[in-house]
Image (cartoon, grey):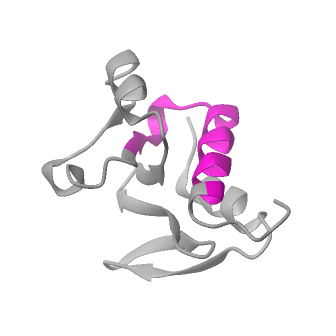
Amino acid sequence: MTTESEVRRLCLAMPGVTERSSWAQPAWFARTLMARMWDDGVVTVKTDERDALASGAPETYFWTPHHERSTSLVLVRLAHVEIDELRELLEESYRMAGAPSGH
């Protein structure tokens, strides 16, 4: 099980990432939004594999009607994701959010 503080640590370890509030929740930005706490124990990330993730592990990955139009966004239940998998998700989200050149 991972925590919000681990999400924060992983995000802020990436070059150029900043933290600020978005919809009254902690959020991390590269050039654009890369991750945001959606609810207690749930983080939003960007991925090209939303459908595959959600169909393979619906207890971990899901989305709400709010995310329906943004097909690259997926919600991740932190209680069900290992830290290494979360790191990979955040790295993909970082690239999709406009990581600085060379990263």
Residue 52 screen position, x and y as percent:
40, 23
Residue 15, image x, y percentages: 80, 70
Tell me what residue is drawn at x 70 percent, y 66 percent: 99
Give me the residue at 76% from left, 71% from top.
100
Q: Residue at x 40, y 39 (%)?
A: 77
Q: Is residue 3 left or right of residue 56?
A: right
Residue 31 pos. (x, y %): 60, 76
Above or below, 79 against 10 in this view is above
Say if the magenta span includes residue 82: yes
* Quarter-of-image position of residue 29: bottom right
Q: Nearer the viewer, residue 73 or 78?
A: 73
Q: Which residues are magenta?
A: 75-95
Residue 1 magenta? no
The image shows residue 82, relative to residue 20, as above or below, that is above
Q: Splitting the image into 4 quarters, where does residue 38 fall?
A: bottom left
Residue 69 placement: quadrant: bottom left
Residue 55, given in percent of the width and then of the height, sits at 32, 20
Q: Nearer the viewer, residue 67 or 86?
A: 67
| Residue at the extreme front of the image, as rendered | 101
Name the main secondary structure of what is drawn in magenta.
helix
Left-right relation of 85 to 64: right
Which quarter of the image is occupied by the C terminus? bottom right
Rendered-image quadrant of the N terminus? top right
